[in-house]
Each structure stands twice: as structure tokens, then as C-alpha cells.
Amino acid sequence: VLHKMFIAAANRRPANTNVKPDGIYVLDLTTMAPPHRLATTYTRGLHPHGLSLWREDTLLYLYVVNHIVEGDFVEKFLYTGSDTLQHLASYSSPLMCCLNDVTATGPSSFYATNDHGSRAGFSRKMEDYLNIGRASVVYFDGSQYHKVARHLNYANGIYYDRRHDKLYVATTTGKALLSFTIEADGGLAREYVLDLETGLDNIDIDRQGNLWIAAHPKMLNFLKHAADSTNFSPSQVVKLTPSEEGFDVEDVYINDGSEFSASSVAVSTGTELFIGGVFDHKLLRIKLNK
């Protein structure tokens, strides 16, 4: 078992220069030493967003959404245990205009979310203000790109459940979790929509099969926080436990933002919960009740 946590870190407040460089950081969960940045053999700038791991035999691949001047890319790295990630490939397509998150489905295939239908300009603003569903999911099968889900409201986190061969997508302005079954060609068949009445962000699944989703319960507060860090944005972590009826839903963490603002990811180790945020340059570590 690899007792490490990989963190995609990017400074989303450019005026704040007193922070560590963008990149992939690793946290040793055994020693709990401060996270350190991994070097890479990648030669362009790395400004990561979503991140996904794929283990194939003894190999561990990292897929990372990267936002650079040239556009949005998915970068593929190999982690060998050293402090340097080996860059293996860059993936780009006109179908991947506005990448948010990625989830690997094999050593050379993945799904990724576009959180908008337009990269910039008036139409992108209208998507936000009028809550127009133009977000999408793209599948890369190893050679070709396919748009496999359309008309979503700010598709954000995405997670491939390897044990059950299902795909989950979190929508932020849609405030719902979408569950898809995967067809033989990689296409998606929508299974159900679970309305959670909060702005969902990233998804993680623990060893027991529970879903952990970080969320933004007050989107207007989030926008104010994005504009000014002194404005708090409430944080929320929702745990979904599989049941015969679907899922039992539980709020594991909720805060007005004074302790931790704008939670965007939650990862459970079984005994502890680690929460990351959109803007905060820290992780929140919480003991979980048995």
C-alpha cells in the first residue's frame, strides 16, 4: 500500500506571491512531514487542476489537468517512487476546451470534464449567469476523443469506480451527482441523478466504496470569496454510503468558512479526513469518529 497523497497545487490568486510554486506535491501519510513538490521531466509550465491515479501492476500513473497559455491539456506522468515524475504524454483536443477534472480508466485512457462550453468571452459568462448547461464529458479511448455527455451544468469532479465499472460526475451549479454505466465503446448511459442541493466539487471513493464529495453550499459567498479572500465561503463535505435504496447521505463536515473556506476536495483514510480548498494554501486534517 502506498501511504502517500498526491496534491495538485496551483496559485489561484496571482497577486499572492508569498506561496510555493505550482506543481504536484506529495504528502507522506506515515511521517506526516510537510508536503514537498515533485520535480518533473515535463518541459512546459505545470499549473495543475484535476488529478487522477491509475495503478497497473507495479506501475503508478498520474493524469493531471494542466492549464497553460497554449490551452488545456491532460498530462500523463509515471511515478516511480523517486522525487521526479516522468512525463509520458500530453493530450489535447478541440473537444477539451475547458478542462476541470480527469479520471483514468486504464494506462492510456481517461474521462475528463469540461466545466463550460466556451473557453472565454460573453457566451461563457452567460453560461454562469443564466445557468445554461453547456458543460460536457470527454472520453479518450487511447487513440480518439469522444464527447460522451452533454448539456451539463458546470461539470466538475469526475471519478471512475473501478470495482463497479461506473462513472460519477459532480455538477456544481446543477447541484447533483450523476451516475453513469459505461458501455462497451466507452459511451455513457445515465443511471440516475442524485440531487444534493449544494454546489458539488471533487469526488473521491474510499476503500469501503463510500463517496466523499466536497461542496460549496453557498455559491454567492464563493464568488465573493473568489474576488476577496477576506470574505468567507462556507465549506461542506458530504459522505455517500451505498445502501439498498442507493446512498445514505451524511454531512460529515460543514463550516461557515471561518475555519476553512471553499472546500474543493475531501479524502478519507478511514481514520482521518483531509480537506483541500480552491484558494487556501493549506490542508485541513480532521479525526473521523469510528
Image (cartoon, rainbow, N blue to C red):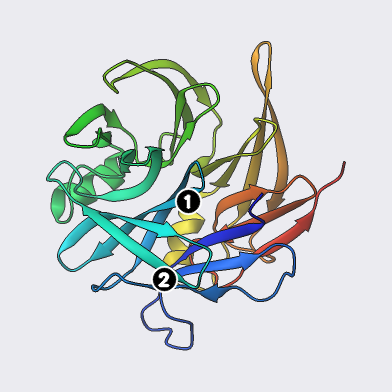
> For the view shown, which residue lies furthest in the left direction?
94
Query: How busy is the neighbourhood of tag 2: few (under 14 within 10 Å), some, or many (20 plus)?
Result: many
Q: Residue at x 59, y 62 (%)?
A: 261
Q: Residue furthest bottom?
A: 18
Compared across the picture, whether 274 is left or right of 188 comes to right
Please tell me whether mark 2 sits on a helix, a strand or a loop: strand
Inspect the image, locate mark 1, and give the three-letter code of the amino acid beneath it: Leu
Give the label, 2 or 1, closer to the camera: 1
Residue 22 at what x, y percent from top left?
40, 74
Give the amino acid at mark 2.
Gly
Quick check: 2 left or right of 180? Answer: right
User: Closer to the camera, 135 or 288?
Assistant: 288
Q: Is residue 197 above or below residue 129?
A: above
- For the residue pair 14 and 288, the one nearer the viewer reads as 288
Relative vertical location of residue 204 with respect to residue 160 in this rendering, above or below: below
Q: Which residue is mark 1?
A: 60
Quadrant placement of the C terminus? top right
Tell me what residue is drawn at x 18 percent, y 53 percent.
Answer: 119
Q: Secondary structure at mark 1?
A: strand
> Could you tell me which residue is drawn at 38 percent across and 83 percent down?
15
Q: Quadrant of residue 136?
A: top left
Place of residue 211 in the rendered image (x, y in percent of width and height, measured from the top left): 61, 34
118 relative to 256, above or below: above
The residue at which mark 2 appears reads as 23
* View extreme (right): residue: 290
User: Which residue sits at x=48%, y=88%?
Assistant: 18
